[in-house]
Image (cartoon, rainbow, N blue to C red):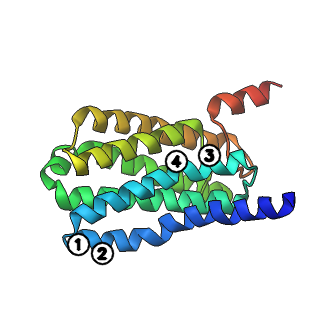
Amino acid sequence: MKYNSHRSAWYVINGITVYRIIAAPFLLILLFAGQHDIFKWLLGISFFTDLIDGFLARKYKVTSIAGAGLDSIGDDLTVVVGVIALFVTENSFIKEQMIFIIILLVLFVVQVASALVRYRKMTTFHTYLAKTAALMQGIFLLYAFFFYPSLVLFYTAVIITGLELIEEIILVNMLKNWEANVKGLYWVLKRRKN
């Protein structure tokens, strides 16, 4: 009985993650078709599923390397769709803040390139800082689409995302072997001391 409920939880949780991956192209279609009201609500659902799938995976103990990889893809696609929508709907805001977007993009490219060189695949660390950055990105993007782009939320998201990317670059250089679900730099340093 326990096996079946464990297996059912695995399918449901990974199904939630796969929803974000499948939703991404449909969200773009809605965006470019001018269906911005439907787009923002469905983007909100995508961000909400990002919050719950990892929590549920840990609660029901159905974490896996494949699930972590799917989650990372779903997370990245959801944020990319949100950023593309910001370019489409709030172009003047994007132009004013372009330097911060370029800095984050450079950090992201360095992080991905470092991981590909070291591990031959992207990371799925899912650090606490990464989770916080994803939450702040979602809050900023949804607030921007439902109300207006808030500079306070934008700068908060930029700072936390920048710190998260720097932490991942450091982790890639510290961890010889690829690992999933690393809590963060503090825990890796603590583990090394022991």
Residue type at mark 1 is Phe
Q: Is residue 177 left or right of residue 157?
A: right
Please report contact status of discs 2 and 1: CB closer than 8 Å, yes or no: yes
The reply, left or right, for residue 106 in relation to residue 55 is left
Q: Are marks 4 and 3 in contact (CB under 8 Å)?
A: yes
Disc number for residue 29: 2
Task: State the SS at label 1.
Answer: helix
Residue 21 lies, with reference to residue 149, above or below; the image says: below
Q: Which is more toward the observer, 88 or 100?
A: 88
Q: Hey, what amino acid is under mark 2?
A: Ile
- Residue 61: x, y in percent? 76, 49
Q: Are marks 4 and 1 in contact (CB under 8 Å)?
A: no
Q: In the rendered view, does 151 fall on the left or right side of 179? A: left
Mark toward the start of the polypeptide (4 vs 1): 1
For residue 40, side relative to residue 17 (left or right): left
Instruction: Name the residue carrying label 4.
Output: 51
